[in-house]
Image (spheres, helix red, strand yellow):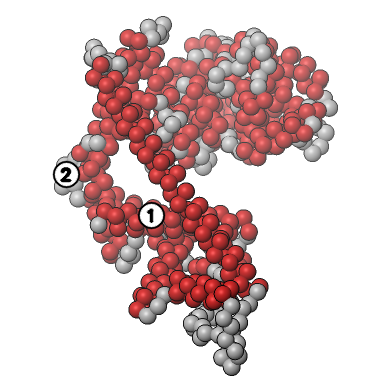
Amino acid sequence: MSNLPPWLIESRENVLKTKEWDALTHNIYDAVDQHLAQSHVQYFTDLSDAEKSLVLERAARSLRATTNGGPTPYDNLNKRVSDCLDKGVNNDVSRSLIKDDPTETKSDLILDKVCDGIVGLLRKWPDQKYKLHAFLNQPLPQPIRFVGWHLYLNNPTYRQRFTNDLTNNSRSVLSPLDADIQRNCDSLVPTLPSANDMVDSKGNMSAMKAILSYHHSMLSNNRDLSDSEYYYAVPIVLSHNPPLSRTEKPYEKSLGVLIEMYRTFLDTMPPTLRDVYLNNSTQELDPWFVKVEYYLKEIDRPLYNHIRSTVNSSDAHTSASVDQYVLSFIRKCCYPWFKYMFVGCLSADPLMYVWDQYLITSDVPKFHDELIPAIAAAMIVTLRDFLLKCRSPSDMEAVLQRRTNIIITRQLQSVVVRFFLTDFKNRIAKSHFGPVIDPTEGRQWTGFNRDHVPQVANRPEQRFNDRERNEQTLQLEKRLREEMAKREENERLLQSKIEQLQRDMERMRQNPVMITTAQPVITTIPPRAQTPVERYVVTETRPKPVTPPPALKDTSHRAPLNSPVHDLLRRIAQTCNRVAHGEGRNSQVLNEQTKNDIRVHKLDLKMAERQVIGRTLQVDEWEHLPATQKEVYSQQMLEAVKARIQKRYTAGRKG
C-alpha cells in the first residue's frame, strides 16, 4: 500500500473498522464455509485458484439471493466506502488549502487527488484495468491516460530488448535511415492539427524520431516506413505523463516505455488497419464505410439526404444507386481518417479522446468495428452546418478534409451520448466484463459543499500520542534486538559445544582404545529411503548426524589395562553414551520423544508442502523439478516449517 496516497490508505483503514465491513466479511465466511461443507472440502486452501473463484462467486450469489428486498451487505458497505472516500479526499484537500496555500482551486485539487488514487490502484492491481470502462465517452486525465494506455499496450519484452540494445551498443538502436526519418518527422508534423503540441517540444520530437528509428532498425526487411507508422507515433508520444520536456531530450526510461507502447500497438491493432497501412488497400475498410453510411441515414436523415442529392444531382438513378454514390463519397472522405486513426484530421484533445475510447475498449472483442465508424459519423454530424451550405461534392470534400481540426471533444461526446452510448454499454455488458458502471449515477459526494475544517495534524495531544507510540515502538524494537542477540549468543555457545564433542569423537574414532569393561550397547538405525516430503529439505539447515563408532571387538580375554589414560577415555566414552542415549527409564522417554518429534517434523513438512505447492507431490515428482524451482520451494517450505514451530512455541508459552 506504499504507492497509494495517504488519504486513500486512511480511508481504507476507516472502512475496515466499520460494522458494514464486519457484516459483509462475516456473511462471506459463513457462505464459503457452507459451500465447502456441501463440497466435502475441509480447507479453503486445498482448492485451486479456479475453484476458489467459483466458491466465492457462489457465495456472492447466495448473499444476493437472501436480501428479502432490503439492502444487501454489499450495498451497505458500498455506501460506507463512498462516505469514507468523500470524507478522506475532502479532508486531505482542506489540509492542503490551509497548510500549503496552493494556486489551484479546490475542484482541481480534488481531481488531482482522485487521479493519484486511481493511478495507485491501477499500478497495484493492473488486472483491474477493465474498470476504465467507466470512462466510456469521457477523456482520460493525463495521469490516468498514461498508466491506462501502458496497461493495454504492455509488453515488457520490447522495453527490455531496447534497454539491452542501448546498453550493449547504442548505435544498434538507430536505423540506417535515421537522418531520413528525422527529416520526414520535421516535414510531416507541422502539417498535422496537433502540430502545436509537437513542434514546440524538443522532447516530443526527439521521442518520435527515436521510436520510429528503433522500429525501423527492428524490421526484418529494409522497407521504408509508411505514413501511417509516422502518424501512429504522435498520440503515443503525447500520452506521456508528465509531458516530455520542451527544452530537453527524453530520458532512456521514458523512451523504453514509449517504444514498448508503440510496438505493442502495431502488434495488437485490428487486422483491418494492419492490412490497410501495409498494403494501402481500401477493400478491407468497406464494412466500416457501410456502417458510417448507415449511421448517417439513421441519426441525421436531413444531412444524409443533402449529401445524397449533392453527390448525385441526376434524377435518373434509383435510390439504390444513389446509396452507392453516397458510399463512394464516404469512402473517399473517411479513408484517411481510418487509415491514420484520426491523427491527421483532429486536434490534440479530441484525438486523445478518440484514442482513449479505442484503447480502454480494446479488450472487448470486435468493439472497434462499432466504435471507429461511430466516431467518423459523429465527426460528419458535428460539421453538418458547414455541409448543408455546400452545393457540390468538392465543397463537401473540402469541409471534411480541412474543417475537422475545429472539432472539439465536447461536440463528439454530445453526438456519441445521444446516438451511440446506449448501444456501446449494451455491447460491453454482453461481454465477460459485465455492465459499465456510470459514475454519474452513483452516490454523490457532499463533502465538497461543506466548509468542514479537518483536525489539525499537529495538535498537542496528537503529538503526545505520536511520541508515546514511537517510544513504545522503539522499546519493542530494542527488546527484540536484545532477544535476538541473546538467542544468537546461545546458539553460538551450543554450536561450539557440539563441534567440540564432534572433534573429540572423531579423534577417538581415529585412535581406537581397547577398553576392558563392557561397553553399553549403541543402537543404530539402518538407512532408509527418503520420503517424498524430505527430499527437498536443504541439508544445511540441520547438522548431519554423527555416525556412531563401530562396535568394539570383545576383548574380555585380554589382560585389563590399568593405565590412567585408558581409564579416562573409558569414562569419557561412557559419559558420551549416557548423554546421547540416556539410561533406563530416561532412555525410553528419550526414544519416545524422538519418535514424536520425527512424526511432528514429518507433519510440518507435509503441511508446508501443501501450503507452498498447493498439493502433495508424488514419490518421484520432486526429482524431476528444475534445480532453481527446488531451491525456491525448499526455502519457502523451510520458512513455513519455522513459522509452524514458532507458532507452537508461542502457544506453549501462553498455555
Q: How many residues crowd mark 1 within 10 Å: few (<14), some (14–19), many (20+)?
A: few
Residue 39 can be seen in this image:
yes
Give the number of callouts: 2
Say what secondary structure mark 2 lies in.
Answer: loop
| Residue at the (81%, 19%) spot, across then down | 179
Residue 226 can be seen in this image:
no
Q: Position of residue 155 (x, y in %)?
A: 61, 38
Which corner quadrant of the image does residue 80 belong to? top left
The reply to whether dot 1 and dot 2 touch (C-beta < 8 Å) is no
Q: Is residue 197 left or right of residue 469?
A: right
In the rendered image, which quarter contains the N terminus?
Answer: top left
Q: How many residues crowd mark 2 within 10 Å: few (<14), some (14–19), many (20+)?
A: few
Q: Is residue 131 left or right of residue 522?
A: left
For residue 69, the mark is 2
Among numbered discs 1 and 2, the one appearing first in the sequence: 2
Q: Amino acid at mark 2?
A: Gly
Q: Is residue 601 left or right of residue 35?
A: right
Q: Position of residue 629 (x, y in %)?
A: 59, 57
| Viewer-nearest residue: 3 or 460 | 460
| Viewer-nearest residue: 251 or 280 | 251
In the rendered image, which quarter contains the C terminus?
Answer: bottom left
| Viewer-nearest residue: 24 or 513 | 513
| Residue at the (51%, 39%) spot, across then down | 363
| Residue at the (65%, 74%) spot, across then down | 511
In the rendered view, tell whether residue 595 sits above or below residue 365.
Answer: below
Q: Is residue 70 left or right of residue 575?
A: left
Q: Position of residue 534 (x, y in %)?
A: 52, 67
Say what secondary structure mark 1 lies in.
Answer: helix
Residue corresponding to mark 1: 646
